[in-house]
Image (tube, grey):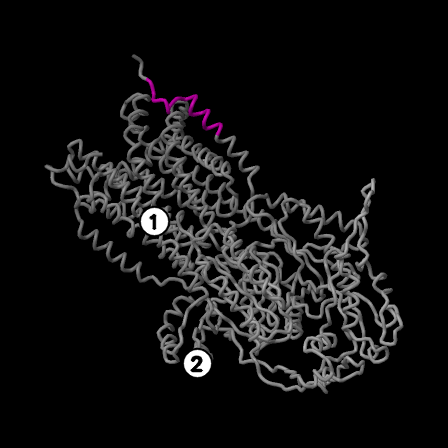
Amino acid sequence: MKNRLPWYLNTRLALSMVLLLCVTGIAGWHFASKQEDPHFAYRNGFIVVSSPGASVQQLTDSIVKPIERALSSIDEISRLNVRVKLGSATVDVELQEDEYQTDALWQRIKERLAELQSTIHNAQIDIVDRAQDTQGILLSIDSGGGLISDRQLALKVREQLLAISAVRNVTLVGDPGLQLAVDFPKSKLLSTGVSPLDLAERLQQANSQHLYAALSGNMTGMGLGAVDRLSDVHYLSQKQILTPSGAYVPLSSIADIHYRTNPLADELFWKNGKQVLGLAITLVPNAVDVELVGEEIKSLIAQINARYTQAPVSIELFQPEFSVKRIEGLMQSLLLSVTGVALVLLCLMSVRSALIVALSIPTAVLSVIAVFTSFDGVIHQMTIAGLVLSLGLMVDNGIIVTERITHFLEQGQSKFDSIIKAVTELKGPLACATLTTVAAFVPMLLAKGSVADFIATIPLLVILCIIASYLISLTLIPVLFQLLSLEIAWLRRAQQASKDRLETIGSGIAYASLNAPRRTLLYCAVAIAVLINVKSQPGEFFPKTNRNQAYVDIQLPIGSHIANTTNIGRAVEQYLNERDDITKTWMFAGFSGPRFYYNLVQQPSEAHVARVVFETHKGVSVKALVSELNQVLKTKFEALVIHARELGQGPPIESPVELRILGDDRIQSMRAAEAILERLRTHKALTNLSRGYTYGSTQLNIQFDESLLIQQGLLESQVSQYIAWRSSGLVATKLHFLHEPIDLVIYDSQASQSSTDLLNTPIINTAGNVVPLAALASQNMRGAPSFSQRMNGSPVLTIKSDVALGVDEEQLLETLQPELLAIAAHYGVRLEFGGELEEAHNAHQALVTTLPAGIALLLLALIVQFNSLRWMSVVVLSIPFGILGAPVMLALVGIPFGFMSILGVLALTGIVVNSTILLIDATLQNLAQGMSEKRAIQLAVQSRIRPVIVTTLTTIIGMVPLTFSGSPLWPPLAWAVIGGLVSSTLVILFVMPIVIHGCIPKRALQHAECNV
């Protein structure tokens, strides 16, 4: 009977499956959704409370505390951080890091707050549950006709943008608000006797819109419009107003009617020194190709601008361009890595083997892309990084199989027997090695939280690539060996000579190590001692990005007026515009601006906050520029907290250092905070120290004499409406004839808004007489809180700080912690550490929590493979020695050991374990053939040295393009892998032979112990 290959080595089947997967992978790549960064579950959001005129204490007692009580029973909420200001409050809601069904949780939050809203009539509660969306496209609107004209155009453009299916949301940036204002001055009240309350009541009645009628017997379906609706400005101006004398006059005869921006608007947008209006666009995440959508948006804007002599719509920030550059840059790294790996293979292996292994790389990559995109996988920077990181792991299995087939062929066996024997011999050890490599990435895959979500695609892609590599190595590679017989004689001779030299070197290393184990281990110990003492480079746990954009955060004392904040912001913007290395600037006052990059901290409705975003010329070192700006701005604005920052990676962090003082006694908390602040000021490594609290501000209080009010027939609410008329304006009704509802407001443009003028406000009593407010009330000035902060229902004071360039904030805080905790204990308060330290801890915790699962899978694979605790221990022992070179290499190239370096170390674990398993397996096979212990180990090193060297070199070559990546995200990972590969290769060649020799059992137990 003719020998037949197993079914999975059928040529037609293997090639057909490969072709199908490759075609599917190409199509998947072309049609897949693409974006720059991964998308996260919505674990963060805002609750915005608006109650104009309410004091901090009123808001806290009547609204904030009820909100805290309403949400206290939702266990999935991790933190409620509340900031209360005059007239408004913001509640930052953080859900637990392991929550993924966030839509349902936010719905529960909305239901609880809807019940609360029904009981509160003097405040508006709004929920922003999509705060984590990236507003990656920012447009500016400048119609040339002023802000009101800009706003009308912006609303029209917004409607057209929302018609694009890929656009999720469009928000107005720096919206000044729009009101239809009825300017009714004090002089008109005195001359006509008409009060602003009369006007408000009349206009409200004219716009009630609740009496509707229907035509009966109407065969044409004609409707009947509402008769009590204010439909336009002209109709409003003709409304007849009844005067106390009994005469009717049109509204336009006693008041000036015009549109105005909202005087209480608390968010402003300035572009190159001019106030404009913006539109921030949010795309649907994980469902679009940002490049295609970007082109569609550009086309729409071009069509809009074509209708005007001077284009009113400009693109300011455009994330799709950065997304395309990021993906293209990583793709170039991938192609360079594949090319480099192919050249290494060609130099160290036969032409046929090199070609076969090289062909297996794109096959595995396309197969993985086919599977990944079939389940709606999104292409972004982490996806491609996972593919690059997998290169060395993918070629490992192919190299081993081709080497083994070649080995049997060189022994004179037939091609058929060589393939069958190699596949049969290696499918078990390779399965074990594959499983152990997968185990190294399981902690990353199973980790929960925002940081884990950011890198989740890397372990997923690596695991898929490893599995694909294993299957291809046992199917496609043997099939290609049957079909290809390409050889170049001179190259083959050179490669054989190279192989012989490597094997001689491997044999010599093993011989020297086994015959002088103490000396070898002594050298090893000395080397380890030296490496451990290499000083690591201090720096941030999460690296920066490589955009030619940065920003300056400005913080005035809490309670500052937005006008002051705007003036400082404009001064900073003007200085930046005068610099030759900066091309554009955008200034946002009263808030932190749109979230055009996922890492940016959001600060809505903060009058004391401004942010200036700037863009540099290409080739300008943003890092150096930011460092220079911090020195210059500190000199120009000594009394303020102004800090230039690069765009960063990782979770949004407002300040690297954040201290939280918690205690119910505000006086003691303030004393503790000031003592801590004083201690921090003495440390030169800390800069831009700022209080997240205030001592209070002056407040004007008006106290009514109730007996006088009763005599005049007035109520407190009526007098409050008079005060509103003379200040920000009395809202009469809401109009609905524009693109969106606006308030109809009655105000006095001649009011100076001083306390004296306010007390001279004329009030008409029930007898029709005019009484000044001063006759009914008295005023006093007193201090009152202008800001308070609460966390999880308890008062909290915060201190924030930046760190000097090159300072490791984790090490710094670890040094200061004992002293700071002692200060807190002295005042009887609790001290918590946030900022970079907290986020680094969360990132570590996310991986450590799932580490046992990876370890369990690793140990299980080793037990199944070797059926020996002894050999399992040897493999596990190789891990720490193998990855020792990672931190050393990072220190040598001057890169901090951060989060991406940790990922590189985890990736190394699989590579180190893989090589050790194959070395032990070869040794056990040689022992089973009756060789002596030292001879078995020596031949194992001799036969495995080329696969080990080739795997090391191909992985290093695969990582090299990432070391030169424009993004600072990837060099830490790449250098960690390279350093670990160098150390692991040396350990495997010099140390592992000694360890294996010491662990070989006695001859009587050998065959039972080493059943492979």
Q: Considering only order in the chain, which callout, 1 or 2, is on the residue closer to the N terminus?
A: 2
Please tell me which residue lies in front, 357 or 611: 611
Residue 332 locus on image (x, y percent): 52, 44
Secondary structure beneath dot 2 equals: helix
Residue 128 can be seen, yes or no: yes
Q: Would residue 632 be visible to someone looking at this image?
A: no
Q: In the figure, is residue 349 to the left or right of 940?
A: right
> Where is mark 2, residue-wise?
668
Relative side of 392 to 380, left or right:
left
Q: Label 1: how many residues lie within 10 Å, few (<14), some (14-19) or many (20+)?
A: many
Residue 969 colored magenta?
no
- Looking at the picture, how far across and down is residue 951, in whole percent? 36, 41
Amino acid carrying label 1: it is: Val
Establish if 997 lies above or below 880: above
Relative to 309, residue 612 above or below: below
Give the magenta part as a residue range.
4-20
